[in-house]
Image: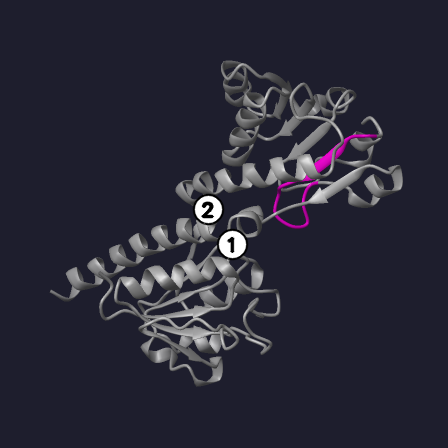
Amino acid sequence: MLTGLQIAVMGGDARQLEIIRKLTEMDAKLSLVGFEQLDHAFTGAIKEKIEDLDFSLVDAIILPVPGTSLEGKVETIFSNEKVVLTEEMISNTPSHCTIYSGISNNYLTGITKKANRRLVLLFERDDVAIYNSIPTVEGTIMLAIQHTDFTIHGSNIVVLGLGRVGMSVARTFHALGAKVKVGARRSEHIARITEMGLTPFLLNDLEQSVKDTDICINTIPYPIVTASVISKMPAHTLIIDLASKPGGTDFRYAEKRGIKAILAPGLPGIVAPKSAGQILANVLTQLLKDDLMKRKGKTQ
């Protein structure tokens, strides 16, 4: 149980509702910032404006998956009011206060570091990334079906990267009957691709490997699907870029060539917000429990 914990949940989308539901069930006290348009009421949760929140009582701050903008703005789907998190606010929290976010940027990392508060990035955890790969794959299949006029079965699929998402994507499209090639840099990844019964290639050979591609799925978060690569693709190729913004694709050149290219980060929150929220809620609950036990152990 999380009895006695005071948690501020700031902004976010439908995934945050599952987090709120789980934390209230665990008996935490919640301040909801950026939720005034939410009709549903949760026992133990109070809607507050950020300027009215007493940060000196907050044990943890839970931000949306994107964290904040570079100006400190927090995304609020359930509010029209501007919510901005500042260094001063974080500095006013107790020294043990932990900030939880999906990802970070220079602003969020900077203000937490200056305030000497711990920042936990959920999407850097293997368990969250692996669980999230499930709705990501389902969303990728949905996009592939929506934006092509041919079946996945028998198609030539190129997957770039064999990380946690890339592996799940490659395995699933292979299971659907596609002919899957996977590009990687590390020799152990080439070995794993071979073991999975897929066709490996080195990313240095990417231009030669996309010449017969029907669907190219990128998971690498840096410019990899360049103009030179796109120029070698057939005109009907669909590019689905799953990397975090701004993705790894030259979208300008893809449009110029008439190739459909879709930037699709955050698919779990779009195609399965309930499941994606439950994944985050379960991990957050365990992390908060662990922090509470550590603090209790230090005070005893």
Q: Which residue is mark 2?
A: 124
Name the residue located 61 percent from the left edge and 18 percent from the top edge: 200
x then y, percent, for residue 14: 50, 60
Name the residue located 48 percent from the left edge and 79 percent from the top edge: 50
Left or right of residue 22, residue 137 in this image: right
- Estimate the spatial distance between the alpha carbons at disc 2 and disc 1, rounded to whole Å: 8 Å
Q: Which residue is mark 1?
A: 103
Instruction: Tell whether position 242 is magenta.
Output: yes
Q: Earlier in the sequence, mark 2 or mark 1?
A: 1
x then y, percent, for residue 80: 60, 76
Find the residue positioned furthest to the left. 300
Task: Characterize the local packing of mark 2: few (<14), some (14-19) or many (20 or more) Cα atoms within 10 angstroms.
Answer: few
Name the residue located 43 percent from the left edge and 73 percent from the top edge: 32
Boundaries of the magenta span: 236-248
Name the residue located 48 percent from the left edge and 54 percent from the top edge: 102
* Amino acid type, label 2: Glu
